[in-house]
Structure formats: C-alpha cells, structure tokens
Amino acid sequence: MGATIALAQPTLPVEPGQEATVEVTVQNNGTVVDQFTFEIVGDAGAWATADPPTLSLFPGAQERTRITFRPPREPSTTAGIVRFGVMARSREDPAGSTVEEGALDVAPFLAPSAELIPRTSHGSRRARHELAIDNRGNVPMDAALEGLDADRLLRFDLDPPNVSVPPGVAGFANVAVKPVRAFWRGPAKSRPFQLAVRTGGPDSEPLLLDGNFLQESILPWWFVRALLLLAGLLVALLLLWVLFLKPQITSSAAEALVDFGFSPKPGSAAGNGGNGGDGGPDGSPTPAASGLVTVTPAPSGLTEVDGRLDTTQNSLSPTSGTLSITDLIFS
C-alpha cells in the first residue's frame, strides 16, 4: 500500500516577494480508496501552500496538486539553495506515507536605505553628521560613500568611506563637513550638499541624501556688542577711580597720619616734589619731604634732619661714620 509522488521540476527558482509553483503527481498504490494530505517540510515549509491540500484516490489512480512558494522579501529570506520535501500522508496506511525532495533557488536582492543625522548642521569651521545605512536585503552589502557639492564650497571627511553591512543590520559612518573658506563676521550662510551611497558598483544608481551646512562666522554676532560694553565699563571704572576713589583714599591716608601724630612739613605737597623743610646739616635748603618726617627727637649727640632723601640733590653723608634714620614715611 502507500503512494508514490513525483515533482515536475526538482529545482524551482523564486524571487523573494514573488511566488513560484510546482506540480506534484500522486499515485495510490494501495488496494482501497485512500485520502492523501500534503505537507511541505524543511526550511521552505513556512512559505508553501498546497492546492488542493488533500486528494482522494482510487487504487492505482493518480492526481496532481500544486505547491506554491511565496518567500517574503525580507533579510531573513536567505539567498541560495533552500531544500524542501513534499510529504503525501496516507489516511489508510500512515506507514506508507512518502516524501519527495526538491529545492528552491532563492534569488538575492538589495534593499538599501540611509538616513543623515542631523540633516542640517551648523558651525564656523566644521560640523559633524552621522550616516546610518540599513541593509534590508538578503545578502551582505558594500556601500561606497561620496560627498557631493556642486558649488565646491565644502570638503568632506568620511570615516569610513566604505561600509560593509550584513543582511538585516545597520552600518554607520561619521561625516565631517568643512568649509573651504571661513569668514570672520556676518550672518550665517547656507551650504547645501548631498551624500551619495553606492551599493551596486560604480555604474549603479546611487542613493542620494540631501544635507545642509549652516556656516557661521568665526566671531559670534554678540562679540562686537560685548567688546563695546566692556570698553564702556573700563572707562566708567577709570572715571570712578579718578573722580571719587583716589581723592577719598588720599584724604583717608592723610587723616590716618594725623591720627598717629604725623604731620607733613609746611609748604610740602604730596607727590609734587616742592621745596620746604629746615635744610640740611650745612643750612642749605632741601626739597620737601613729601610726607617724609621724623617724629622722634634725635638721640644725644646726633643731628636731626627732616626732608626728602634724594640721591642726586640732597645726599646725606654721616660725619662720624654713622647715620641713624629713625623714621621713613613713603607717600
């Protein structure tokens, strides 16, 4: 008992996303009427259907059923030879069920897609983008990258310039965009460009991605305003010092000297080097002390001198070999 089956075509080519059909002839070798159910086993079983799915045959009779394969157009559909088996399962004699083997020749296909992130970048000297390349085909894909600028105002640094992407996986590349010439001031300038992704050789039609580089000036727009504001602040601080702070500091210092018992020589003026004082040891006039005074009486046997010490006009030379300076006040 049992049955015999035969495939009209042992190897069947098929394109992912389309369908292919093969006829299967079944003969009942038993002595009773039998019903045969068809089952497709193997890796291609999920893609197959039988029409009709069952046949009832008299002894010695034969009929045909059609097996249709519909492999999906997805990366999981492996390209190449995919083997399968058509089983005719007998209801009357399960042990007499039989299997005939065949093969599908699944064609390869490419389905690339790419995205530029971000689409618009900005900077004064360079900007960065990231290129994502998806391989939605069923074979490995080699993508060659190229930057296109019709105005030749930009340079491109692609890292890497060639990307290998397995099926169902995304590959990435860094894209640096640099202007040929920079400018110091002015509004931002738009620099459109394109990235070409070639996946089928140098003669194939590339996948083009539009991008834009917004080139900015080296000096930001607020730089001049900040510079003017800083200059105004410095002028204000200088006027504050000259008109208010310096006179107050000078007056406070003079009051502090008076509080401690110090007093300038008559006719002296701070910082002007005017003449004043009692003169040197020989009675000659000496410049004003400009705040240089002695406040302690000279020890016995020493001469007391008030006035400015000047190395060119009023030098003091000790007569007995010793010069005693009691107090120095600097103004």
Image: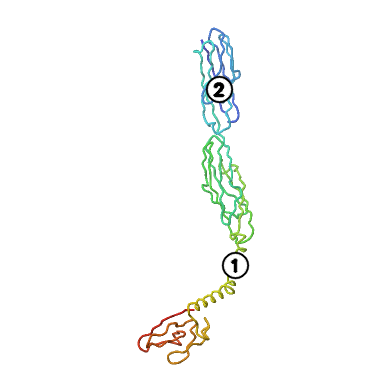
Q: Name above or below for residue 328 compared with residue 169.
A: below
Say the numbered circle drawn on residue 233: 1
Three-letter amino acid code at disc 2?
Answer: Gln
Residue 15 visible, this angle: no
Residue at the left extreme of this rendering: 321
Left or right of residue 288, residue 240 in this image: right
Percent of width and height locating residue 220: 60, 59
Residue at the top extreme of this rendering: 31
The residue that disc 2 covers is 9
- For image coordinates 52% across by 27% down, the residue present is 82
Mark 1 neighbour class, 10 Å CA radius: few under 14, some 14 to 19, many 20 or more? few
Q: Secondary structure at mark 1?
A: helix
In the rendered picture of this protein, how many numbered marks are placed on residues?
A: 2
Nearest the eye: 94 or 249: 249
Between marks 1 and 2 in the image, the one whose residue lies nearer the viewer? 1
Three-letter amino acid code at disc 1?
Answer: Leu
Percent of width and height locating residue 269: 53, 83
